[in-house]
Image: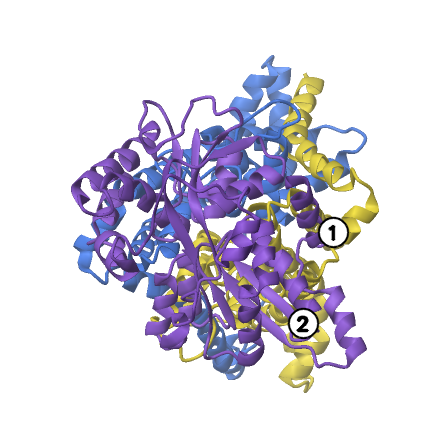
Amino acid sequence: MASLAVPKPPARTRGRSTGGGVGPIGIGVASLWLSLIVLLPLAAVFAKSLEGGPGELWDAISAPSARYALLLTVAISALVALINVVTGTLIAWVLVRDDFRGKALVNAIIDLPFALPTIVASIVLLSLYGPRSPVGIHLYATKPAVILALAFVTLPFVVRSVQPVLMEVDREAEQAAASLGASGWTTFRRIILPALYPALLGGAGLAFARAVGEFGSVVLIGGGIPRDTEVASQYIAKQIETDRPASAAAVSVALLLISFAVLFALRFVTKRKDGR
Amino acid sequence: MKIALRTAALTYLGVLVLVPLAMIFYRTFEDGFVAFFESVTTPAAISAISLSLLIVAIVVPLNVVFGLVTALALARGNFPGKGLLQAVVDLPFAVSPVIVGVALILFWGNDGWMGGAIPVIFSLPGMVLATVFVTLPFVVREVEPVLREIGTEQEEAASTLGATRWQTFWRITLPAIRVGVAYGVVLTVARSLGEFGALTVVAGGVAGESQTLTLLVHARYIDDHNTFGAYSASTVLMGLALLTLVLMTVLERRREA
Amino acid sequence: MSATLLATVAAGCGGASDEVGGGSDSDSAAANSGVSAVKLSLVAYAVPKVGFDLLIPAFNQTPEGEGVTFSQSYGASGDQSRKVESGLPTDIVNFSVEPDVTRLVKSGQVDEDWNQGEHKGIPFGSVVTIVTRKGNPKGIKTWDDLLKDGVEVVTPNPFSSGSAKWNLLAPYAEKSNGGQDPKAGLDYLSKLIGDHVKVQPKSGREATETFLQGTGDVLLSYENEALFAERNGEDVEHTNPPVTFKIENPVAVLNTSKNKEKAQAFVDFLYTKEGQTKWAEAGFRPVDEAVAQQFASDFPTPEKLWTIDDLGGWGKVNDELFEPETGSVAKIYDEATG
């Protein structure tokens, strides 16, 4: 998509624009800041996990409860991401294509799980679906409870990544398909969905990454039963609380690698889809 | 068909989000406003609210300053390792809050890399660091695309006219990215107030001293067996979340304008 | 008797403040008397808040305690002890088991003579009890009953919780006849932990919460915690097994405290007649003989009460049984739940 590009700044100002508006000092400051806050502490986790050698690391990760927690977390997060793909698209569709009173309000509500503290989400779900449930639904300490909590906190991701794309979709192709006799569902499946793939993947990936690390919303309603409803983050917290930092570090590393791998794969896939 | 889709979507949202929230509001105000008010003005509650707000007051300026520097470096600069910087900014989204806590203990704790030289864990600096970690991307990610979009023309024009870098920044750049910064700040505030996982690991959790509002909710429910107290504290947080939503919506409109 | 107790407990909690800490009361007292307000910090194990809720206001009524405010932290005993060791600032500690204080003696934060007083540093205690759903539907009354098929037992994680250690020592003492036959004791614990324990709550209080939320058939806990749940109207009841264990909860002042005198004054208050009465009212077994007599109907004497001294003292017990990786109970626990 060629456009009139801004002419390249003459050589004499290039020295100044090396760091953009902030110069090399700015880059240095930003790097130092990010290192101190993010990189170094994370490096400490990786180092601790290898403290006893790769054998110890493997033992810590493959301990029955640890292994179960990791597998459970990945499986449930994937399931929740999938649920979100369906419900997120549905909600985005309704928000973009439909019109009804209160739509703006509904649109704003979508971001609520994003703005709400996770512990509040947990207590909120517990009040309704826990042992003191007024509607007789008792989900405390069950896997459905974990799924519910994770679905709650990941609600915005797919919706918000699909909405803008849906708004920009070229209606002409849809109308052409309709005039050729295609049903609504076929049109959706053949014309619209392919256009949404990158957004869906991106949103699902974010939802997955959020879900695998989630703690606050699960902690009250999930019950944290080892080898049943205990998710990886709860396991890690437990290891720290029982004075086993190396084990906590090891499982943390496993969880981090999983998130990184998924996000990296997603970035790779969406870049390719963009034709770059 | 349309109605069916609409009903499905609204039902999902209702069951998942609205009904549980309504439940808490109901349980909180069931016994009247006074009961709620008393529950959230106990000494420990007031201390918790103050601490949460104090942390926000420290975290926001830090994130704005360093966030702007980082956004400028990423949007305007071209240097080796830029891709790495970009990735590191996004890292906090992929790190579980509990892992944040673990990382801080392993780095700043008594047995950590810093050897406990600077007292961080179980005190305010630790809580601030944890909160900065999780809110780091917000300002950067909201400001960077705006910087890219507005381009450098105006800034370059200003500098050829003799403006210093600071003047250029203050007079040209900042006003243009103002809404982006505001949006990033709102997200930062919301996330800071809501931080829980990292704090359970690194905060002292002493009622009246090192307990934030989120930790108070948890402590009331589990330690004190004070369900009503937990609900009422949650309602305060919910109110703040709703306020955040309103601000987000308002700023969203301004952005699109 | 219990109605009076209930009323006293409720009054002690005072209106909406679940955080009694001499908030408004002693603040105004301080303002009136011109005494400069001293703030004491207390780090305690998970369950004694109900006791301190009575003791702190009572202390504030004394000349020594006028105008003193408290900040309090409650949590799993081992957890809290480690936090203090790592630098969490505090004046007074009250843990579930002695080793959690010993840790601080080793780190130099508590003087070695902390337990040389008349009551060996222990102002109150309890016994290990069996808590069941109201009506005790599965008829669980003894340690053997816990091993019945399908019975799920809730007891906390002994690596973070003090309560858990007491809970495991009680049946161990019975089965091993006071430590004389360790194998028998460990066999029992193997079966208990391996087949009947699923969840691993962090602390005694979390265990109670988990049980109240519907998990498990039986909760092992402190008698005072059972009383707390029952007085709160929960649908549970407790049975002291005929053979059980004497729980002793230590209190110590940190030598790093900035208010050592006041802190010591508070700790001393815990042993006075008035202090002991308050502990009893809150459901804890007092150490003062006279007060214990007064409240005898609340605290039935079990047929046989084993103590930590019978097993050789905490040093020995902690090393042999609970030391991570090497202790016999630690190993059983890891294998069953790791």
* Distance of label 2 from label 1 (alpha carbons): 51 Å
Residue at horizontal 51%, vertical 46%? C224
Q: Position of residue C175 (x, y in %)?
A: 25, 38
Q: Amino acid at mark 1?
A: Ala
Task: Identify the residue under disc 1.
Answer: C16
Reading the image, the residue beneath label 2 is B173
Q: How is the image coloured?
A: by chain
Is residue C278 depicted above or below B172 in this figure?
Answer: above
Element marked by disc 1: loop
Q: On the same chain: label 2 and label 1?
A: no
Indicate left or right for B129 with A268 as reference.
right
Mark 1 packing: few (<14 Cα in 10 Å), some, or many (20+)? some
Colour chain C appears in: purple
Q: Position of residue C246 (x, y in %)?
A: 39, 49
Find chain B in the image and tell me its colour. Answer: yellow
User: x, y (%) of residue C226?
Assistant: 51, 40
Between A48 and C3, the one lying in front of the other is: C3
Residue C311 visible to the viewer = yes
Residue C143, labelled with which disc? none
Q: Amino acid at mark 2?
A: Thr
Q: Is residue C144 left or right of residue C179?
A: right
**Tint of chain A:** blue
Q: Nearer the viewer, residue B3 or A197?
A: B3
Mark 2, chain letter? B
